[in-house]
Image (cartoon, helix red, strand yellow):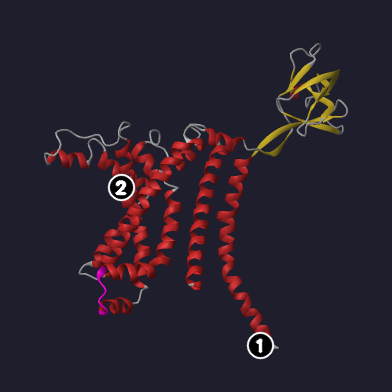
Amino acid sequence: MSEKITRRRLNITPYLLLLPSMIYLLLFFAYPMVQAFQLALSKNVDILNLRAEPNFQSAVTGSLALQTVASVLERERSEEILPNGARRTIFWFKVEATDLNGERVQGWVSQRNVFIENRSTSTTLRINSGEIGVRQFTLEFVQRMINDSRFLPALGTTILLAVLILPIQFTLAIIIGLVLQSQIRGSSLFLYIYAIPLGVSDLTAGIVWFAVFTQQGFLNSALVSAGWLERPFIFLQVSNMGWMIAAIVIAEVWRATSLVMVIVVAGLQAIPRDYLEAGEVFGATVWQRLTRIVLPLLKPSLQVALILRTILAFQVFAVVVALTGGDVLTVLGNETFRWYDPGRFNNPNVAAAYAGFILLISLAISFFYLRAVRGQEEALKHA
């Protein structure tokens, strides 16, 4: 009996260990994601309740949204007592209009909630203030994002940067990892040098490379001093988009290759040296050992790094803003900030639509990679 109780307690242990991770995911991933989609796909609509009688305590007969134009059926004048005891005349209007559900409703509204040109003769009025608010589903903000003139250029630039950056980063990371794995003299020092960009933020990396590529920057100074240029060359300019893209790629490769390199080095250290020595004994060349032994065994680490770097590539923002200002050349992250910025559009709803779009792209890429990996594993099992 005691053994059964002990087993039951042990079965709960994995779930207890996963509990902090689940709480973390709920608080810092699921909840913000739900809030972002709610902000992008809904809007608050202020409504005004219609009353059965011309007073605020009577029953509600319906509700109208702001800016609704209603027909005036009846008028009534009454008095209300102010906090200081004085009396003030207040007008009430019985109106008819279409509510949020498309139904015709009637009821009384106060003059304080409507705009009417003439309280005695006007036959229509407009609701200009409400009492309560409701949240209504809408695709308005998603449509504004898609119809934004900068949406397609931002998406195209983001994809272009990812296509250019990822192959360069992985090639350099594998080369650096193999150099470190060879255990040549001073390889530990090289590891620390290569890992320096890990401690540099996106914005700092952008500022550093802006100081390199600007007209009076380090690169122009070196080229002019060496006599290769007569005068400084303007790398970052509107008419030279190719150099602007190249500057961003160089800055991102310098900043984030170290992250891939750390993952690759960890994967290389997990490969038994016996496999490499066996390949060498059987006469395999360096290229054959790399393609037939190292890369297949390194595949799980490369897949993790690929998912991570692809997601981060679609979130690139600070480097682009630091090098280009974000107006000439833009990406999805920059457009998200531009719509959220109080000094520009100050529209959190469209900003949330951009953020949700980036999230969906990241989830789709992760799902695609994971499905591809699973498909390869199943194919190897049936082979």
Please tell me which residue is depicted at 34% across the width and 66% down the height of the picture: 265
Q: Position of residue 98 (x, y in %)?
A: 78, 28
> What numbered label is drawn on residue 3?
1
On the rendered image, what quadrant is the N terminus found in? bottom right
Label 1 Cα neighbours within 10 Å, binned few <14 / some 14-19 / many ≥20: few
Q: Secondary structure at mark 1?
A: helix
User: Among all residues in the image, which is located at the extreme front?
Assistant: 383
Viewer-proximal residue among 331 and 67:
331
The stretch drawn in magenta includes residue 285: yes
Q: What's the magenta region?
A: 281-286
> What numbered label is drawn on residue 343?
none
| Residue pointed to by mark 2 | 250
Q: Nearer the viewer, mark 2 or mark 1?
A: 2
Q: Position of residue 208 (x, y in %)?
A: 29, 45
Q: Position of residue 324 (x, y in %)?
A: 35, 37
Label 2 Cα neighbours within 10 Å, binned few <14 / some 14-19 / many ≥20: some
The vertical placement of 261 against 345, above or below, is below
Amino acid type of the residue that numbered disc 2 sits on in the rendered structure: Ile
Label located before the other in sequence (2 or 1):
1
The stretch drawn in magenta includes residue 194: no
Amino acid type of the residue that numbered disc 1 sits on in the rendered structure: Glu
Position of 164 with respect to 235 (left or right) is right
Q: Position of residue 336 (x, y in %)?
A: 49, 40
Question: Which corner quadrant of the image does residue 21 belong to?
Answer: bottom right
